[in-house]
Image (cartoon, rainbow, N blue to C red):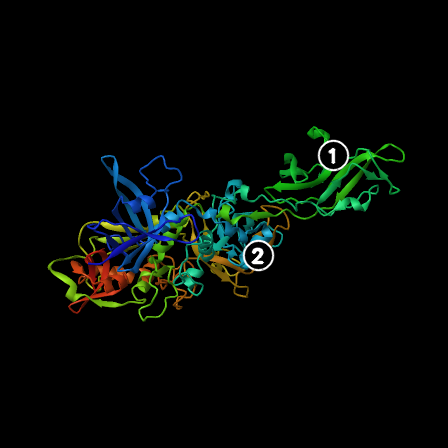
Amino acid sequence: MQKLQLYIDDNPDGDIINYVRIDLFQDETVSISQSIQNIKDPAKVFVPFTKSFTIPASKTNNKIFYHYYNFDISQGYDARRKTPAKIELNNIDFKTGFVTLEGVELKKNAPNAYKIVFYGETVGLKDLLGETKLQALASLSQYNLEYNSATIKARLQTANGPILCPLITSGASNKDSDLIPPPSRLYYDSVTNTQANGNLFYVTNDDNGVLYSDLKYAIRVKEVIDAITAQFPTLIFSDDFLNASNTEFYNLHLWLHRKKGGVPDESLVVSFPSPVTGFGPPNILATNMLNGTGLVIQNNWLDTNGVLVSGIPNTLQKLFLTTSSTDLFTVVIFRNGVTRATIANLSGGGGAIVISAASLGGTFDAAIYTITIFSAVQIIFTEIKWDLGGYDANVQVGWTDNYTVAFTATASFTFDIPTQIPDIKIIDFLTSIFRMFNLTAYLDDNALLVNGSSNPDFGKIRVQTLDDFYTTNVATYDISEFVDVESSQVNIALPYRAINFKYAETDTILAEQYSQQFGKQWGAEQYTGSSTLGDGFDGPNSTYTVEVPFEHLMYERLNNTGSGIAPNTTTTVQYGYFVDQNQEPILGKPLLFYPIHQPAGTDTTVISFKTAPTGSNINSPLDNYFIPSNSLGLDPTSATDIKNLNFKDEFNEYTGSTGFTSTLFKENYDTYISNVFNGKRRLIKLKAFLPLNIIYALKLNDTITINNQDYKINTIDTNLITGESDMELLNEV
């Protein structure tokens, strides 16, 4: 019999944990269940470790839980949250986690027992993240950048830290065009120069090319993971898989697509410099009336001779804004930092726009004034000026003079990452990535490694592929002498006929056309066993599906369809077309891809980049750019390049090769699933009475040996008092 003790933090609001021991029933059976990846549910990625049990309503426990049964106690125990806790076996720390209180059992109106649940750390991960979405990750704002043609072009060519712009069109320009094909459908024709139709062939001062507003930025997934851990400081991942040297992960990018079509206007609203400074003083005013915060209006003025004149009211009378743009904008006038007036739906094109104090029903009296200008499009102001008015002290006649700045800077949109990132919960985002790469997540609560050295990942959530998990710091335990030989079972390992690996259903045009042509989803895999090994499974007529709720785009490499320069030859352009079969913009699911930079050079196809839908001088040549790809690279002979985001080894969209065989299934699932489907694989159910040293040290990736046969742990349910363990084991073959 083991001596089990349960401790709970009695200072949950403090920074330092203060453990106190909970009284337990003497005859209470306390057990824990652990499973790393139950083969009946291969999509599980977070390790469950929970146990419900009852404890007596003793004097000690009543104090710990503040007599929870008594409604009248104020500021008592908050059962809505988890409290840090730990389990000791024979005075040695065994597991750390959390305890929640579920209720109190009363007998004859007196408290008898508390029902509590002990949670392991990784189960708490779901509760920690809750319903929080990616848009709540405040630290992503550090990567905000301008959204305009110049910045889009720059990010098409060069990544700015984790931000780049892939050649994926959103269909934003479709709604404004009656042309067939619509302008966002890209093609390359070196002869036919049809105006504004998405032809990427560059012609000087023509309408050919891809329009900048049809493109969106993308962010490296690594930075999204880092933003999650920054938002939740208690969440610390290991770098087993999530590291910069793992190109399969580090090169992965998330397309910043939050709304179908173009970028939402509400996240493109940024002001001109606030305040607008640099005004020159009027002739009648002294220069000491200027400062760096805005326009200073005083009640007392200096006359032309520099003499202070008191008691003469002077005011800011009018604001003039001159622009040739007919696009709408909004002006906000601030008095001492507080909004004085907001004038919306202004537009230029007809000379200066005048905003007067009188038209706003008052005067702009003594204060410091600044303005901010908001617009959903870029606008150039050629001049912004204030009119000041008052009385000349010498002659007591009215005067007006100007306080003027020539303002030729272009308004810039801020592409706000949090408001542009896909609408998905953090926990769903993480789970989806884990499913893609068959990752495991578990709290590393072993202070020492198998060799006795200190564990650098102690206290972290280890994130590993399942294959790596089963080969990292593995110990072997021979439990032959502890097995109960009275009863055991040998069962079939996997009660499924097949396992499907797929992404979410998509309506994107090329993927849908592929599905219609071949009768299956682009990139999906159905595993039914290896015919070459003779291990095909004809068992129960059921299929298990591992689905990743991400978009999976089929990309298109363009040919030069012209009959002139290099006719009917391939270009170096590959792009994504995020529209449905009617070529209408769609929202879809979050999209992950690998960006591949096509460098400048004689072999790189020059494409046309457009800064506006129509007009002269709107396009410029682009000789290098990021193309989106499902593969890490484009060389079918490279072991790295052929790694890809398909579950099945499809043909590569760029090369047309079928050699890109390092799929998500092959890289991350094949070893485990094929072993399970192996005809010699069995699921063994047995009972063992494990000693404390094994209970304490046993990890779910360890090897169990029984009578010279090795096994892997599927599940283990251990009574911590008696050591009795119900085990499901998979035989090694």
Q: Is residue 375 above or below residue 710?
A: above
Q: Quadrant of the C terminus?
A: bottom left
Of residues 363 and 193, the one nearer the viewer is 363
Evaluate whether residue 534 shows in this view. yes
Q: Which residue is mark 1?
A: 365
At label 1, the amino acid type is Asp
Evaluate whether residue 43 shows in this view. no
1 vs 2, front mark? 1
Q: Position of residue 598 (x, y in %)?
A: 50, 62
Packing grade of label 2 (10 A; few <14, some 14-19, many >=20) is some
Of residues 714 and 236, the one nearer the viewer is 236
* Residue that appears at 29% across and 67% down: 474
Packing grade of label 1 (10 A; few <14, some 14-19, many >=20) is some
Closer to the chain start, of discs 1 and 2, is 2
At label 2, the amino acid type is Ala
What kind of element bears circle 2?
helix
Q: Is residue 601 above or below residue 421?
A: below
Q: Which residue is mark 2?
A: 154
What kind of element bears circle 1?
loop
Q: Position of residue 701 (x, y in %)?
A: 28, 63
Q: Quadrant of the N terminus?
A: bottom left
Q: Residue furthest left?
A: 486
Q: Residue furthest front?
A: 59
Q: Is residue 335 left or right of residue 662?
A: right
Q: Position of residue 513 (x, y in %)?
A: 37, 48
Q: Position of residue 191 (x, y in %)?
A: 54, 55
